[in-house]
Image: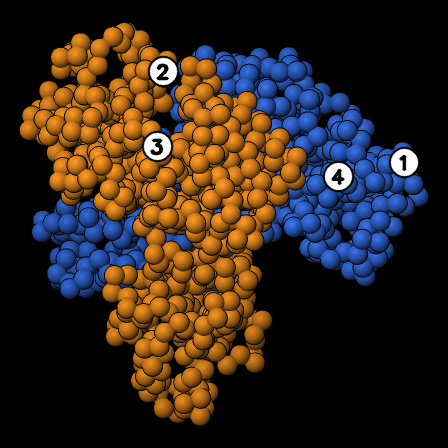
Chain colours: A orange, B blue
Amino acid sequence: MSMRTRDNIILIGFSYSGKSMVGRKVAKRLGWSFVDTDEEITKLAGKDIPQIFALDGEEHFRELERGVLNKACRGQNAVIATGGGAVLDEANRELMRESGVIICLEVGAETIYQRLLKNGEGSSGPLRPLLAAQDPLRRIRELKAFRQPYYDLADWKVGTDDLTVEEVSNEVIRHWNFRDASCVVRVAGGSYPLFINRGLLEELGERMKGMGLLGKVSIISDQAVFSLYGARARESLERADFGVNFLALPPGETSKTIENAIKIYDFLIERRVERNDIIVALGGGVVGDLAGFVAATFLRGLPLVQVPTSLIAMVDASIGGKTAVNRPGAKNLIGVFYQPKVVLADVETLLTLPHRELISGWSEVIKHAMILSPELLRFLEERAEELLELNLEVAAEAIRLSASLKAEVVSEDEKERGRRIILNYGHTLAHGLEAATGYAHFLHGEAVAVGMMGAAIISHELGLLSSEVVERQRTLLERFGLPTRCSGVNIDSVLGAMELDKKVRSGKIRWVLLGEVGQPVIRDDVPRDVVLGVIRDLLKGNA
Amino acid sequence: MSMRTRDNIILIGFSYSGKSMVGRKVAKRLGWSFVDTDEEITKLAGKDIPQIFALDGEEHFRELERGVLNKACRGQNAVIATGGGAVLDEANRELMRESGVIICLEVGAETIYQRLLKNGEGSSGPLRPLLAAQDPLRRIRELKAFRQPYYDLADWKVGTDDLTVEEVSNEVIRHWNFRDASCVVRVAGGSYPLFINRGLLEELGERMKGMGLLGKVSIISDQAVFSLYGARARESLERADFGVNFLALPPGETSKTIENAIKIYDFLIERRVERNDIIVALGGGVVGDLAGFVAATFLRGLPLVQVPTSLIAMVDASIGGKTAVNRPGAKNLIGVFYQPKVVLADVETLLTLPHRELISGWSEVIKHAMILSPELLRFLEERAEELLELNLEVAAEAIRLSASLKAEVVSEDEKERGRRIILNYGHTLAHGLEAATGYAHFLHGEAVAVGMMGAAIISHELGLLSSEVVERQRTLLERFGLPTRCSGVNIDSVLGAMELDKKVRSGKIRWVLLGEVGQPVIRDDVPRDVVLGVIRDLLKGNA
């Protein structure tokens, strides 16, 4: 995508995927021009395409196609519908890539066959001869399979089988609006972008429209955040013609209860919220988890927009679809995976974040660096002072890097069946510390900082990790003002709580350890006495 | 699958999908023999496969392969790992189909490439020459795309990219155990079977093991059902070495609350339930909806087994993953889509079902017939007397037919974005009737019966449906003792409630109507006065 030098939308895909109809509609909606290369070729040659094939041969057709495509791609603000075979040519692909965002309209062989039959004998399309084949459906499958690798080169794919032209057009425009995203999470239920920048709250309404969201908006927030940013969010939404309701709950982890979920359900019921209406979660991790849980479970799923206003929510909680509420003594045990439609982080909201919470947030950024990225680690080491002074440009860059790493892991393993577990680096011990102190003593990031020290030291004691890396982590955590040890916590309570944690698997604790910066290692065979020794040292405050 | 005459498992798939390793493991677990056709060919020819290709040519290799495969397929209780290209031959495919269940191990081009690199220069596999290609990954993609249509002919596909050999073997055995299912629901998150028969409660534990389920079981039930069938379920589970907890709630729709969900959460927390532990929902629709909701939302999803004991749950509620709880005045508004791992319906439990509930259940069966199946409609018309006498063999057959229809619709549209809406035939008015009478007057199926009459008559008044079909539906409903009209219900309350229903879309009511038996039609432009007139007549009791 980095090679793109113009703003066009190029539609590729098999015959009968609806490229022309969709392209025309998208162009109209965006106020752009529309080019159908097959149509241009017909005009140019003065005969229809089967005739060109029959009289002049395929090679001549491809030559005309290259010319037409070349002309179209050198324009600006055009939707270009290409012939089904245009992608087979390497020069064409290069041309398209430079010219804009390439979106493939996917269509199943069954659907192609049905549309071809409907079109019937009158069809002049390139697939018509297939109708005479012995097993046309199979021939379509084979032809499609052969081209699939080329279609797979598209920036985005949009499934069309069950959608109307209107719905496919929405999807095309939605994906076009991914182009200036900080990163994109790609999951089975549909990809979604993360926007991370200054001043984005002003753009909330417009960005949501760009994502194809319609319907009434219910903002769920906490009272502290809402008093600061509620008006800005509302005004932006109303400017974009959204109807807006809102509900602000008391701030803090104690609000993340089923009882508050019920309060929100009843609020939504009272306001007759329907399936296409939208939940906007405006706040930190608590609001995101709670509002996300409600969005996931109301009417079997409402569209959700995450607008994180804390650092920890921007780099972690708002990305990846984990939602949750607590029961007494059982944090986050109730929840579902439910992905938002878009995440929009306005880094200016960090200016009003309490200092201790800001510091706590950098802990998760350091975690991402340790398990995934030597580059991010160097960036944090080099720019620590600017980050601590909250230079918003530098902070936005660090947040984008960190969020991109998380987005990548989630894209690989949405439901934490495999690789996503590495994000729990430092969290096994952190959860133990938080539970043992009744979630009153540590902020989450602080507990994670101590937990990361525990995991790093265990890694070292098992011979996996050099002491240099352990010390590098410690130094950075301390520069950010994060704790690397603690005292006054009961070790038995910590151990008891760790064994109740969600990451436990049939009684064994699965540790995320480190072999090197960026090289996490999963182990469920860490000897209990090693764990005990390390935790004992950390909790004595002399690790 | 109907052509299968032997019990073997045939593994197909691209090179490096792990067919040999998995096959060996599966054979061991089942106590079967294992055949690796490539190995047999090597033995037979006295040289390795690249040598056969080089010295004797591919044609000779294919001939040897046919012979080896032929011999293997004529055995019994064998796991047969085939070469990556064996499926290309039509005679081979025919042979496999007769011989057993064909399971394709799916593997991504990236993974193939990684495994090939790992194997490196030492590789003697058929892909080795690809390493010398200019863009090996692309070549693999193309080769794979060409073969994909043949792999798609497998009975089942198992993704292997992120799984261990152990996990893939589990999946193979799980799919093998689909072979005597009454039908299978195919959804994105993984297919699951429905077993519908007499005496299945005795087999609950064994069947669950066959589905690869391990871990502790929590049976969630209602007190009425549990007193009748709890012991039988427990004993079956314990015979299969499952640890069992149970919780039985008061019966009836009033139990389907968030408060009861909380009761179950706390029960699970107290018993330290972990991610692989299983929820068994033993009961009717209320238990299935409530326990399903809890399974979906505890630890972000526990494996769920539906054991429906009412007719309506067997043919409808237990299939398709709709889970829900109620809020006062807001039925089913809170819930998620969450698919079970297996549905097991023991039709003998119908013997203790109250007569009125049994009758109510046939209403949904008749609905499936009207919208989807002239065959089922004829079956119901011909066998009505036996069904009303609860002849269990005939009932099981009707339930299987009905459940299969629902399974098919759900497989096409898991999340009710498209076709699944047709299952709401009769439900728009039914929900209005139920809400207007505080869910106290009608059983669900009774309201649906009246609702189907409403939808049929509206269809007729719009000129879509013949009066013969309307009368045919009425006659059948009446033979089953179901209401086709009613009196004493306030029409304004009904209309108000209909407009609050989930199926409403931006203020418009989407009606599921009928063009003919088996031909549903969706309309959101039914004139209000037509609706009013029809409902008025129905509610006067003189439709």
Q: Residue at x 55, y 22 (%)?
A: A259
> Is residue A414 rendered to the left or right of residue B289?
left
Three-letter code for the amino acid on which mark 4 is drawn? Ala
Q: Is residue B75 something that shows in the picture?
A: no
Residue depth check, mark 2 versus mark 4: number of the one nearer the observer? 2
Ranked by sequence position, the earlier of labels 4 and 1 is 1
Residue A67 coordinates in the image, percent (x, y): 32, 83
Q: Residue at x 89, y 33 (%)?
A: B488
Q: Which mark is residue A353?
A: 3
Q: Chain of mark 4?
A: B
**3D distance between C-alphas at marks 3 and 4:** 45 Å
Q: Residues within 10 Å of mark 4 (few under 14, many from 20)?
A: many
The disc placed on residue B487 is 1
Amino acid type at mark 3: Leu
What's under tag 2, amino acid-wise?
Ala
- SS for dot 2: loop
Residue type marked 1 = Ser
Q: Give whichever of B467, A453 is nearer the camera.
A: A453
Dot 2: chain letter = A
Reading the image, the residue beneath label 4 is: B497
Q: Secondary structure at mark 4?
A: helix
Q: Residues within 10 Å of mark 2 (few under 14, many from 20)?
A: few
Q: Are marks 2 and 4 on the same chain?
A: no
Q: State the image coordinates of residue A306 (x, y, percent, origin top left).
A: 43, 41
Q: Nearer the viewer, residue A490 or B391?
A: A490
Task: Check disc 1 and report its element: helix, strand or loop.
Answer: loop
